[in-house]
Image (tube, rainbow, N blue to C red):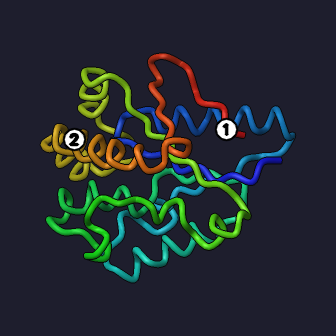
Amino acid sequence: MNKIRLIVEGPDGSGKSTAIAAYQRAFQYKYGEPLRVFHLCSMFGGIPRNASDYALRVQVMDNAAWPCVFDRSPFISELVYGPILRNKTVVPVASLEADISCCFTSESDLHGLFTTYLLYCRPPYKVLLKNMIVSKRHKSDVHCDIVKAHQDEIILAYDEIISKNSVRFPSQILRYDYTRNELPGIF
């Protein structure tokens, strides 16, 4: 069994839940056991409220058993959504360069215990805009209204972070467009 952690990232409506469900089915079929999925926002009652709340989420990621999937990373999502939803971020100031190397350099990664991949879910622009406009049942109305008002800003922030870091981690950052139905093989 592969020693893998997968972080699934992307704007609201980009196909993260679709990708996670497909990986769960494939993993169950291949290994006969469920794939652990962590929804950190659900586990902790929403987005990080302060630096210690953020640090706790990072600690959960670092100590999670493998193989597993994270529905968003507190680091990347906070860089994108923190400034939009709260006009600030709780990510440590030194990290605000949109450098996501911390996602790939945990203690376990460095000791070769497992490999971390980032799946960036990004359908075509028009599809993504349409999906972002549709209110999500698991999100608050306030969250959805803010996201709708800042659609372009969110998409651009994600695209910039992923583009910048794809050069540094070309084999660990994968892209997924659910409209093409071609999920990268990982597990």
Judge whether 26 appears above or below 38 on screen.
above
**In percent of the image, x 47 and y 33: which residue is there?**
175
In the foreground, 176 or 130: 176
x and y percent of residue 26 in the render?
73, 32
CA gap, disc 2 and disc 1:
27 Å
Q: Three-letter amino acid code at disc 2?
A: Leu
Instruction: Give SS at disc 2.
Output: helix
Horizontal side of 111 relative to 119 (left or right) equals right
Q: Quadrant of residue 91?
A: bottom left
x and y percent of residue 128 in the render?
30, 28
Q: Three-letter amino acid code at disc 1?
A: Ile
Residue at the farthest bottom position: 52
Q: Quadrant of residue 115?
A: bottom right
**In percent of the image, x 25 and y 62: which residue is there?**
82
Identify residue for label 2.
156
Earlier residue among tags 2 and 1: 2
Horizontal side of 27 relative to 165 (left or right) equals right
Judge whether 60 appears above or below 131 on screen.
below
